[in-house]
Amino acid sequence: MNKNLLVLPGDGVGPEIMTEALKVLTAVNDKFSLGFTWSTGLIGGAAIDATGVPLPAETLVAAKAAGAVLLGAVGGPKWDALPMDKRPEKGLLGIRSELDLFANLRPAVLYPQLADASTLKPEVVSGLDLLIVRELTGGIYFGQPRGIRDNDGVRQGYNTYVYDENEIRRIGRVAFEAARVRSGRLCSVDKANVLEVTVLWREIMTELAAEYPDVTLSHMYVDNAAMQLVRAPKQFDVMVTGNMFGDILSDCASMLTGSIGMLPSASLDSNNRGMYEPIHGSAPDIAGKGVANPLATILSVAMMLRYSFSEEVAAAAIEQAVSDTLDSGLRTADIASEGVQVVGTQAMGDAVVAALLA
């Protein structure tokens, strides 16, 4: 098993939150004698500033050689004026595509200590534990042709939304397998009433259901799914959907948990080798202020241990340390409520390490 990791701090709050995640990784590595080593690389805006491109060749070579990749965040207004193919986000899309990280797992779990931090009533979200499985290397984000063209003197932007049955089938299997080890319920989200590509999506998901008689499959249009996530989120266990819909719905689900700063993610290939990152982005408005929530990145380390290395005991220890830290009353500003102690990025990371080693 390749336990050499590549760490990509990236942009905005990425370096700050990655520093805390690496403290936790160091502690768990030592405590359980896991044998991990790691090196750092450049991606996104940081890579543009240093090399002129968002995904340097050296980074891609190192990523392909690593057992897993830990990513902070990419992007920021500093690079917004660059051509589309040179922006930081192209580095993220590029590494996903080059590593064939087609399956994005985004859990939305509400820690009971944060029920009051959610914008929804506690009785609506208490006990929430759902998983969104998002296809990550196809769909409208990668489809060709795309661009901006002249159409009889009028500028016209265009993108292509495309999936083939093999792409749909492989992400469907990931979702069915995930549902099988949870509560056995899978909701496939599409827009089959207006988009032919999702007519095919629904057909393939229905075909797959015959192979998983222990999983109950349902279908839901994406607009209704967005509404239901806010109305009654606990009706869902596992949701599976395409790249764009998954991008939107997972951010919506994140706020059910109190803050987008709490949600980790895993992006996996067919062998469970993956890239792990928080879903919250680079948050340039708070970068450098020491107030960012590092818990999503720390929980991404736990996901890495579980999915890519089958280190369940170590993964659970990190998750328990996060829960214990929340029990102690410590909160970063994004999850603060009355009667808690608000701390910064570094103090939160230190507290998780202390709980892990206690």
Image (cartoon, rainbow, N blue to C red):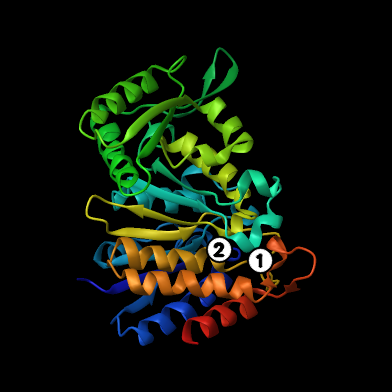
Q: Which percent across, then down, holds residue 108?
A: 51, 51
Q: Which percent across, then down, holds residue 58?
A: 33, 66
Furthest-top residue in this view: 152
204 and 285: which one is in front?
204
Q: 10 Å neighbourhood of mark 1: few (<14), some, or many (≥20)?
A: some
Sequence-first disc among 1 and 2: 2
The image shows residue 150, relative to residue 130, as above or below, that is: above
Tell me what residue is drawn at x 45 percent, y 61 percent. 43
Residue that label 2 marks: 11
Tell me what residue is drawn at x 56 percent, y 40 percent. 233
The image shows residue 141, relative to residue 280, as above or below, that is: above
The answer to whether residue 167 is left or right of residue 234 is left
344 and 152: which one is in front?
344
The answer to whether residue 193 is left or right of residue 339 is left
* Residue 337 seen in render: yes
Residue that label 1 marks: 287
| Separation of marks 1 and 2 at Cα, in angstroms | 9 Å
Q: Which percent across, then down, holds residue 294?
A: 57, 69
Tell me what residue is drawn at x 69 percent, y 45 percent. 120
Q: Tell me the quarter of the image containing the N terminus.
A: bottom left
Tell me what residue is drawn at x 59 percent, y 81 percent. 351
The image shows residue 156, relative to residue 314, as above or below, that is: above
